[in-house]
Image (cartoon, coloured by chain):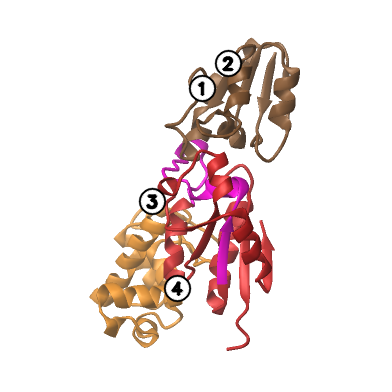
Amino acid sequence: MLHIVNKSPLENSSLESCLMVAGSGDVLLIEDAVYAATTGNIFEPKLRAALGKVKVYVLQPDLDARGMGDRLVAGVTSVDYSGFVDLTTTNNTCQSWL
Amino acid sequence: MSDIKKFMFVNRKAPYGTIYALESLEVVLITAAFDQDVSLAFLDDGVFQLKKGQQTKGIEIKNFSPTYRALEGYDVEKLYVMKESMDARGLTEDDLLVPVTVLSSTEMGALMDEQDVVLSF
Amino acid sequence: MATIEVSGKTYETDEEGYLVNLGEWDMDVANYIATTESISMTEQHWEVINFLREYFEEYQIAPAVRVLTKAIGKKLGAEKGTSEYLYALYPYGPGKQACKIAGLPKPTGCV
């Protein structure tokens, strides 16, 4: 299944909960959640640990908007809006961690 | 003049994900007309507001980050960034698009205590 | 949405006559808006318009009048950086009138 997170991991526990619950499948980071996939952020070790069990995607336009396009954590896949749509169609279900 | 008050705008949210950052900036620009002693504090995710290199074309939202560089012309020159917040986000002063004063959380707290008016965003 | 038409070209405006799309701005529409504000454009008028457009390009806002006055003085000479000079060119307010002619939004905080 697909998990979508849109909150910064440093001000909200949505991503933390998501990664605790999601045992497999895809996790897509959008809006302020993209900071979680940037190097130097203190959430980085937790994200790296999750890369072992889920596949993590990040919405590139949101990364660029925040000036963070050049510091994506290795192992995270960047997608554009059509990639976002693809993820919603290739997965049967989707949970948005609002 | 005794009617000059110390105003502090406390910015704690990242840009674009919510409207807080832009709203704060607009209120700062309006307040600047009243000749008060204005400080801007950036802590927690608020430090992301000042990140260099923001390119918002892809999300079709106005990039308001260049406006922080106009603040000097509005005589808003006291910009404070909390060190712990930058460290936690892998940012250094070189990553920021305007000159700032870096404060520890203790110093930030003391500065907050000195204010007559605190506006929270 | 209101529109204005100048030599066969249509420009979208808000209800107060400010252009909606900055990118559509050209000298034709600037001259037209100036006419509706009863201003006949001179070199001095254009100097302010060009300054405003450059300012907007750099900072993404229309400056407050006080900021504009100071910045004009710095860029174009102290004798031009006064409210007297700017109000002589734009009697109903350099912020309001010049921004409109320059195709910028109304300055933030300007009522």
Q: Is residue B101 above or below residue C75?
A: above
Query: Are discs 1 and 2 located on one and the same chain?
Result: yes
The answer, for residue C109, to whether it is visible in the render is no
* Chain B representation colour: red
Label 3 sits on residue: C23
Q: Position of residue B56 (x, y in %)?
A: 47, 41
Instruction: Name the spot of residue B33 as percent of width and height, x first.
Output: 53, 76
Q: Chain of mark 2?
A: A
Q: CA distance from mark 4 to mark 3?
A: 20 Å
Please name the color used to draw chain A. brown
Quadrant occupied by the N terminus of chain C:
bottom right
Asked whether the residues under marks 2 and 4 belong to the same chain, the reply is: no
Q: Which mark is residue A86?
A: 2
Q: Which residues, given as a range, are shown in magenta? A: B38-64
Question: In the image, what residue occupies the spot 36% across and 81% down?
Answer: C86
Q: Which chain is orange?
A: C
x 55%, y 39%: residue: B89
Percent across and percent down for residue C73 are 31, 78
Q: What kind of residue is marked 1?
A: Val
What's the distance in space between the residues labelled 4 and 1, CA to CA?
43 Å
Q: Secondary structure at mark 3?
A: helix
Which residue has dot 4 on it?
A: C95
Q: CA distance from mark 2 to mark 4?
A: 48 Å
Q: Is residue B29 left or right of residue A95?
A: left
The kind of residue on which mark 3 rests is: Gly
**For this rendering, which residue is in front, B84 or B35?**
B84
Q: CA distance from mark 1 to mark 3?
A: 30 Å
Mark on residue A79? Answer: 1
What residue type is disc 2 on? Asp
Which chain is indicated by disc 4? Answer: C
